Amino acid sequence: EPREAAAKSSMSGIGIAPEGIFTNEIMFDMLLDQAWMEGPVPVLEYVNDYIRARYGARNYHSEKAWEIMADTVYNAPAAPRPKARIVRRPSTDAWSSYYVHCDFLDAWEHLLLAAPAFKDIDTYRFDLIDVSRQAMSDLFDNWYMAMRKGYYKGEACTVEAYRPRMLGLLQDLDTVLATHEAYLLGRWLADADRWAGDQEELQNIRFNAKNLITLWGPIGQLRDYGAKQWSGLVKDFYMKRWENFFDLILENLGTADMFDEDLFDITSHDWEDGWQRNHEIKYPTETQGDTIEEVQKLFDKYMPAARGICHKSMRVYE
């Protein structure tokens, strides 16, 4: 118990050295707020108060969405958890989630139902994209597992069926991410460019800006550590890696070699290194499309498939 330990030590305060502070803001706020709390955090009460302050008003659907998330994605075990499969270099590995994807879909639906009340609130739009991104990541995982099962059975038709679904999902996800400035690769690169004093320094800064969010090291010592799901990065980096992965497994399906992961790692690194050194492509620094409209399209297109996997009927909320 941290409080009991603190009472027996010389600790006089708390602090954090965060990475990715502009993502799960509630986690950092809750941690620092504990300096003014006398006991354990009443989680649901805290979450409801936090969301009312974040969006500016009470709302049944927004509060319900966050209550579900507090019990699913934010209720993680202490053990290390793998990153989303979307942002990991493709492989034939398998692992399970620590929460029930079907329950998280309820949170996505509830949060979208709060749009009439909060559609003009930037923090709501940011969160709606973030929750949509997670729902798509979960669906991508489920489709991957079904594709993987068919692959090991030697079913080329199964792999070929899931290829356009999974790549199409990444394309649609990129479109949604493009509606908010916080999810733009172009903003990250433009911010880095402003530090350059001359052309040589500009090339070095651009390389490092891309390297930090992909290979993180000359030979990928911390590959995919950043794991950013940003517009531009999803479409031009992660989706392309998955295209390369599908090309290789379809080429070798049914042969004695099957999937040569060592070979794929070598060829992937070469491609990844080339991407971070290519500065010809310019990524948008301005948003494109409306968040609510694009999320609604995503929801209408993919929620039936996600619910179908769960074998759980759609719910109707008052």
Image: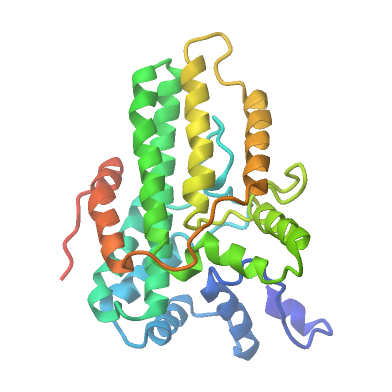
Residue 272, above or below 172: above
Relative to residue 3, is residue 271 depicted above or below?
A: above
Tell whether 146 sits left or right of 268: left
Quadrant of the snapshot with the C terminus: bottom left
Q: Quadrant of the N terminus?
A: bottom right
Residue placed at 41% from the left, 70% from the top? 127
Specify the quadrant of the image occupied by residue 269. Answer: top right
Location of residue 149 (image quadrant): top left
Q: Is residue 249 left or right of residue 127?
A: right
Q: Residue at x 62, y 58 (%)?
A: 78
- In-front residue for pair 37/27: 27
Q: Position of residue 293 (x, y in %)?
A: 26, 64
x and y percent of residue 192 in the render? 66, 66
Picture mark count = 0
Q: For the view shown, which residue lies furthest in the front direction?
A: 199
> Is 299 or 238 nearer to us in this picture?
238
**Rendered location of residue 91, percent (x, y):** 56, 32
In this view, 244 is above or below 129: above
- Asked if residue 85 shows in the view, the reply is no
Given residues 263 and 209, the one toward you in this image is: 209
| Colouring style | rainbow
Nearest the viewer among 272 and 119 is 272
For residue 189, say whether it is visible.
yes
Which residue: 39% across, 47% down?
171
The image shows residue 64 at horizontal and vertical percentages of: 32, 72
